[in-house]
């Protein structure tokens, strides 16, 4: 049953640039071409599709639920022809043409149906708009509510690209204390309640990664999300829910030696049906701008994603798209749309996600086993329930702790031992320079290399932890 709740109007908090951003005059003429198939357009400066040299696009793709390296199963042939000719999706003549900033219809419609099925937004006037991945999406969300001199609320450890984006724009960062579930609601409340005029305009936006937070790996429970959302309501904050790891949720960790049957071990992966509810799913005000991406669940080079927000916000992002990226690359949209709408469908998409969850769950369990065995007394960490990272706190000896710049020495020791982790200082919006933290990714290295890496890390840390 459609919701009768309408989003709250947060447009009074728009920046001057956001208020002035409007539909492209040329793009606005497209509605006449869509509404009248008999219309002969001499208005649009569109190249003729007969000049496009690509007659078809084909890719060999894994069966849903199978790894691409599985040689026992035949691959699917995913082909998009130049002309639609009865296909469930558009032809290349549409995907390769200029379009509006909402994206090609079949691609956008999959994102809309998926969002409705998984997140079930509680207010009626929500919509989706395409992005070229979550970094692109973040910039466009940010520029709606933050400009030079404003302040963005972030976690006390956060994704470096956010810091690198915001600081050159003259936007300040206000970090919020974290625990094992991410941002602490009481700390967020204190920050907002204690804001004074001499700190500048009151913050209107908070940026959060609620699932497998980068870098800490922390995942918010539903109760934590509800508490964060209540604080956002109290202080009228917009929340950017950047959730690229949302579909990489796992079952609880168990040592590999504890369960012999891999089917039993990974029988309770969440797929799509048992994922933790998102912030979007509890949002009754339309104050959550959710960012989704195919980067971690298909491939980052596709540069495809989508944003979910109240329609008036999605419209503003569409207008921004039309003066920047236009929309994600047509070839990427074509491949993703054909794959998800036709070849895999929603059921195949879920089987693919379960396979991806299994791959990273196996890596997580192996990596945690290795760390518990070989780094005992050297580091401590919280076992992540999702994502790609472990966040180590190095247990420095008293002598090492007393030495300024010791974590730079630790980093050099790692490099000398041919192993690389990311120093915690790179994730600090407050500029903490000698943090005893490091981020380790278990996502990319081969399983044999993971074991070798921990052996090397053990040697690198030993002089600083004894």
Image (spheres, rainbow, N blue to C red):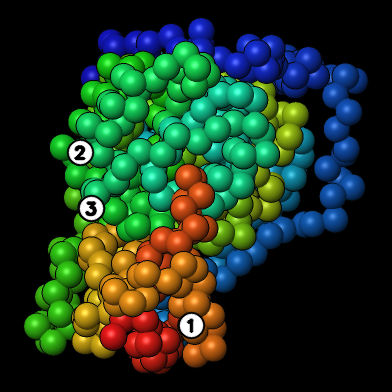
User: For residue 328, which numbered disc appears in the image?
Assistant: none
Question: Upstream in the sequence, badge 2 or badge 3?
Answer: 3
Residue that mark 1 sits on: 414
Q: Residue at x 51, y 13 (%)?
A: 13
Q: Residue furthest left?
A: 258
Residue at x 22% of width, y 82% of height: 376
Residue pictured at 38% horizontal, 64% vertical? 437
Which of the marked residues, 1 or 2, is nearer the chain's N terminus?
2
The correct choice, above or below, for 142 with respect to 209 in the image is above
> Which residue corresponds to the image point at 84% horizontal and 50% vertical from the top-left?
52
Quarter location, residue 212? bottom left
Kind of element beneath mark 1: helix
Mark 3 neighbour density, 10 Å: few (under 14) some (14–19) many (20 or more): some
* Coordinates of residue 440 in the picture (x, y in percent): 40, 71
- Comparing 232 with 355, the one in front is 232
Residue 374 at x, y percent in the picture: 26, 88
Q: Assess whether mark 1 and mark 3 are in contact (beta carbons under 8 angstroms).
A: no
What residue does disc 2 label?
A: 224
- Residue 2 vs 332, above or below: the answer is above
Q: Which residue is mark 3?
A: 180
- Is label 1 in contact with label 2 (beta carbons under 8 Å)? no
Residue 169 rendering spot, x and y as whole percentages: 66, 34
> Does dot 2 land on a helix, a strand or a loop?
helix
| Residue toward you, 202 or 52 | 202
Mark 2 burial class by Cα count in 10 Å: few <14, some 14-19, many 20+: some
Picture coordinates of residue 241, whole percent (x, y): 40, 37
């Amino acid at each position: 049953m459609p919701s009768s709740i309408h989003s709250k109007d947060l447009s009074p908090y728009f920046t001057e640039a956001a208020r002035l951003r409007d539909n492209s005059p040329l793009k606005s003429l497209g509605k006449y071409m869509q509404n009248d198939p008999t219309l002969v357009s001499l208005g649009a400066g569109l190249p003729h599709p007969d000049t496009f040299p690509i007659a078809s696009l084909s890719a060999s793709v894994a069966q849903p639920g199978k790894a691409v390296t599985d040689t026992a199963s035949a691959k699917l042939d995913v082909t998009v022809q130049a002309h639609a000719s009865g296909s469930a999706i558009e032809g290349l003549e549409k995907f390769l043409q200029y379009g509006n900033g909402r994206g090609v219809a079949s691609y956008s419609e999959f994102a809309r149906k998926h969002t409705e099925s998984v997140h079930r937004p509680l207010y009626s006037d929500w919509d989706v708009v395409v992005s070229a991945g979550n970094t692109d999406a973040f910039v466009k969300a940010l520029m709606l509510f933050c400009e030079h001199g404003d302040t963005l609320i972030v976690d006390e450890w956060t994704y470096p690209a956010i810091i690198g984006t915001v600081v050159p724009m003259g936007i300040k960062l206000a970090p919020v204390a974290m625990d094992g579930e991410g941002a602490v609601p009481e700390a967020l409340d204190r920050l907002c309640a204690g804001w004074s005029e001499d700190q500048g305009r009151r913050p209107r936006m908070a940026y959060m990664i609620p699932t497998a937070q980068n870098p800490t790996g922390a995942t918010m429970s539903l109760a934590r999300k509800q508490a964060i959302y209540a604080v956002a309501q109290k202080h009228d904050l917009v929340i950017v829910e950047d959730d690229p790891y949302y579909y990489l949720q796992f079952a609880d960790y168990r040592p590999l030696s504890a369960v012999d049957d891999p089917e039993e071990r990974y029988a309770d992966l969440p797929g799509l049906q048992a994922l933790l509810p998102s912030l979007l799913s509890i949002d009754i005000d339309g104050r959550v701008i959710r960012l989704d991406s195919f980067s971690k669940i298909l491939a980052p080079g596709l540069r495809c994603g989508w944003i979910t927000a109240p329609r008036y916000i999605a419209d503003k992002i569409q207008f921004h798209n039309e003066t920047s990226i236009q929309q994600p690359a047509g070839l990427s949209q074509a491949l993703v749309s054909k794959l998800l709408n036709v070849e895999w469908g929603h059921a195949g998409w879920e089987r693919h996600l379960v396979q991806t969850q299994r791959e990273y769950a196996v890596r997580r369990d192996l990596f945690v086993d290795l760390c518990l065995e070989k780094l005992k007394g050297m580091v401590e960490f919280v076992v992540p329930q999702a994502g790609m990272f472990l966040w180590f706190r190095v247990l420095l000896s008293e002598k090492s702790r007393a030495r300024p710049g010791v974590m730079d020495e630790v980093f050099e020791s790692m490099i000398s031992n041919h192993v690389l982790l990311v120093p915690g200082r790179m994730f600090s919006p407050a500029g903490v320079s000698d943090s005893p933290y490091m981020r380790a990714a278990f996502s990319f290295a081969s399983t044999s290399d993971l074991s070798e890496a921990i052996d090397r890390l053990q040697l690198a840390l030993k002089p600083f932890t004894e």
